[in-house]
Amino acid sequence: MTERKGLNQYYPAEFDPKKIRCLLKPKNHQKKIRFMLPVPARCRKCGNYMSEGTKFNSRVEQVTKETYLGIEIYRFYFKYKLFRRADH
């Protein structure tokens, strides 16, 4: 029961931590986040409406070389949920 969380790891004698490559991500790397709409939104193409507080997954990235009054700008990408009524 003492080792159920796997706190003790075995490293072989020939293990060299310098051979592990560090993955450097670019600054403008998109991250996946769980997001909630702060305001109501409507799709410009089909007119689908999403109310305030709707939760969905989105991708976010920081806009490089662009600020608004010294504030960093972020760009969000998401797909809206298409709600269908049962009577159709």
Image (cartoon, grey):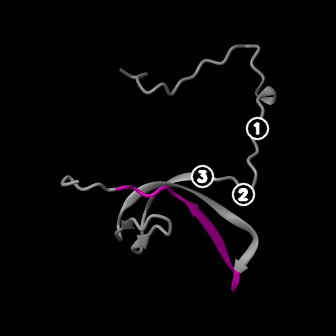
In which quadrant is the N terminus drawn? top left
What SS does tag 3 mark?
strand
Residue 6 picture location, percent across and down: 48, 25
Q: Name the residue under label 3.
A: 31
What SS does tag 1 mark?
loop
Residue at the location (43% across, 22% down)?
3
Q: Residue furthest top?
A: 13
Crowd rating for badge 1 (residues with CA inside 10 Å; few <14, some 14–19, many 20+):
few
Residue 40: which quarter of the image?
bottom left
Give the mark, 1 or 2, whose residue is nearer the N terminus. 1
Q: Which residue lies furthest to the bottom in this view?
A: 69
Distance from the alpha carbon under mark 3 to that under mark 2: 9 Å
Bounds of the magenta segment: 68-82
Crowd rating for badge 3 (residues with CA inside 10 Å; few <14, some 14–19, many 20+):
few
Judge whether residue 22 is colored magenta.
no
Instruction: Name the residue type under label 2.
Output: Asn
Q: In this view, does 51 lie to the left or right of 69?
A: left
